Image (spheres, rainbow, N blue to C red):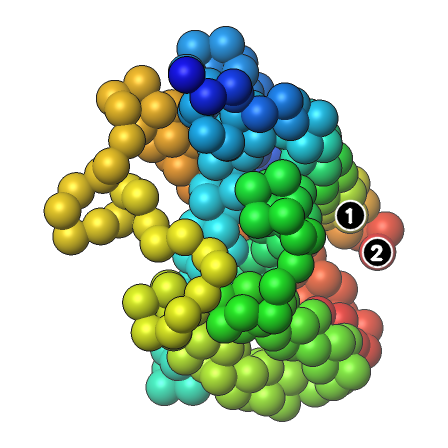
Amino acid sequence: MNDPLARARALLSVGGWITLVALLGAAAVVVLALQFTPTEASQGLAQKIFYLHPPAAWGAMLAFALCGIASIAFLFLGDLRLDRFAASSAEVGLAFSAVMLTTGPIWGKPIWGTWWDWDPRLTLTLLLFFLFLGYGALRNALHDPRERARYSAVVGIMALVLVPFIHLSVYLFRTIHPKPVVLRPDGPALPPEMLRTFLLSVAVFTLLYVGLVIMRYALGLARDHAESLAGGDHA
Amino acid sequence: MPEIPQNGGYMVAAYICAGVIYLGYALTLWLRARSAVKGRE
């Protein structure tokens, strides 16, 4: 299949179906979370945001980490497909970040008594979100595909450095944000029915990431093809 | 036994926000991509 538009159409179809399956899976997670998991005694129903917020954070960090890794690979190999993947992952990561940054404060208000606190975990996460907004703006501002790919790769790599730092921030600093309850050295500290629903949610939102990235890659491929025909610009 | 806090409204708000963002992004992405692969963008 040498025609880029035919490849883009095939990728859009695959990505669309994966996204649809993931969204149906997300609906199943909502039913499981609301009907088949116990209500936590001290936090009440607000604790059920747990099945949304950490999986969104996982999706965002996965997206930004893979964007950074693809950016490093692009600088070594110069393959524009890596740049296209990095751009796709960054945009999908922004959607996951938007969920993380809205569900977090909604959870924080009833539990911490405040919507927001400028503590290291929250502040660094917001900074990462703004970094990737800047990444998107930079891509739109540059017209030469190779120049655009090179400059945005540098931003992607800078942002990659923040990802492990954000994960470790709850150990490195005094913070209002709780430490992980699943990814802990002693193993998960959750009842089995909560853990099962949570792991299903992580799997479903990882699948959603895959579906959305494939669709966004198809969009990038079609745009690059149009750009090569017109000799103009696109992302 | 301590009373369970009545804060279900926050849970509903969080689920609605997440649904709007995920569905909205997936739909707009699909529409943009469909338009681009048809050569309209």
Residue shown at 41% from the left, 79% from the top: A161
Residue shown at 50% from the left, 72% from the top: A120
Q: Amino acid at mark 2?
A: Glu
Side (left or right) of A144 relative to A25 = right
Say which of A51 and A62 sits in front: A51
Instruction: Give the spatial CA distance, label 1 vs label 2.
Output: 8 Å
Q: Is residue A96 above or below residue B13?
A: below
Name the subunit of mark 1.
Answer: B
Say the numbered circle drawn on residue B32: 1
User: Which residue is under mark 2?
Assistant: B41
| Number of numbered callouts drawn | 2
Q: Secondary structure at mark 1?
A: helix
Q: Is residue A166 above or below residue A62?
A: below
Q: Which tag, 1 or 2, sits closer to the chain's start?
A: 1
Q: Are marks 1 and 2 in contact (CB under 8 Å)?
A: yes
Q: Looking at the picture, how far across and down is residue A94, in whole percent?
A: 63, 58
Name the subunit of mark 2.
Answer: B
Q: Looking at the picture, how far across and down is residue A136, in whole percent?
A: 69, 72
